[in-house]
Amino acid sequence: MNAIEFTDVTKTYGNRTILNHVNFEIKEDVLTGIIGRNGVGKTTLMKITAGHIKETSGSVDVFSEKPFNSLKVSANSIFVDDTMSFSDKLTLKEVLKEADRFYANWDSALAEGLFEYFRLYPNSRHSQLSKGQMNTFNAIIGIAARCPLTIFDEPTTGMDTAVRKDFYRALLKDYIAHPRTILLSSHHLEEIEDLLENILLVNDGVVRFHGSITELQEMFVKVIGSEHVVRNQIAEKNVFSRQTNGPFYEALVEDTFTLEEKMHMNKSGIKIIPVPANDAYVALTSSSKGGIDDVFDRATTV
């Protein structure tokens, strides 16, 4: 069963289009990464999903309900981001106690264990925390609430490397033990790719890819060999980046090669190797063919 369905969804603010005819489906109990560079529409997409804002056109269904002003969606979801705040009349420990009353699936033991592990101070107020501490506390709320729809929007801002790794590990362990629909946004795919079952890649208000990490990687290959031979072989292909490493010339290329073409390239001394997921992500979100390399190529020909 689908937990989330977007059908031809558009969101505009004045003359600016944030989401442009977006279509996708996310099944229940799947951990999905919402991936994309800053300012491409990830947060807007997730806020529409949570019912915080309404789409301009199209249709959105969450748990078979329209999420905007839906009590069902509100009662079964949590949206964690760096604007999440709590009353300064309550200490952090008191916030955890109130969360126990508010969230139906709240795990007090887990919340207290994470609170102690991350060395937060019980009598502190939320507004007194540093950026990293604040987002760590927010993340504890998001994990321990165990809402059927849990949304983390760039949750690790301000956290140091060790804390980020611990957060991701805690999230994965609890998700495996208690599956639910989780959306986790980031523009750092390399940090979270091992957690994700699927990714939804957003770029300039449209969904460029929705599938597994493996499927994303298989869209591209890296071609390595002498510059003259490689350039001839990729002349008609979509090239996303190029660089020279000593005697070798490398190009990241959309993998539309036939088996015969690959066999011919191998005989010509060209290596064809798989690409990391992050390289494929960068390729799909590049602003123009060739990326930054094209800027320098054009500059040298002027």
Image (cartoon, grey):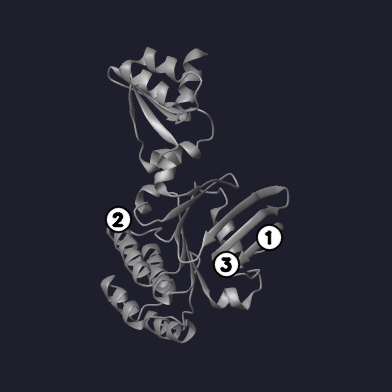
Circle 1 residue: 59
- Examine the rendered structure and indicate whether residue 25 appears above or below residue 219: below
Q: Nearer the viewer, residue 159 or 246?
A: 246
- Of tags 3 and 2, the one toward the viewer is 3
Sequence-wise, the earlier of marks 3 and 1 is 3
Regarding residue 218, the answer to whether it shows in the image is yes
* Residue drawn 63% across the image and 51% down it: 22
Give the mark toward the camera: 3 or 1.
1
Residue linked to disc 3: 50
Amino acid beneath label 1? Ser
Q: Is residue 43 left or right of residue 257?
A: right
| Amino acid type, residue under disc 3 in the picture | Ala
In this picture, is 182 found above or below 229?
A: below
Q: Label 1 near label 3: C-beta < 8 Å? A: no
Q: Quadrant of residue 164?
A: bottom left
**What's the distance in space between the residues labelled 3 and 2, CA to CA?**
29 Å
C-alpha span from label 1 to label 2 = 39 Å
Residue 56 shows in the view: no
Q: Is 5 placed left or right of 132 in the picture?
A: right
Q: Nearer the viewer, mark 1 or mark 2?
A: 1
Mark found first going from the N terminus, 3 or 2: 3
Mark 3 to mark 1 CA distance (whole Å): 14 Å
Quarter where residue 124 is shown? bottom left
Residue 158: image location, x then y, percent = 38, 58
Q: How far across and how far down the image is residue 262, in percent?
A: 38, 24
Residue displayed at 58% across by 54% down: 24
Which sits earlier in the primary sequence, circle 1 or circle 2?
Answer: 1
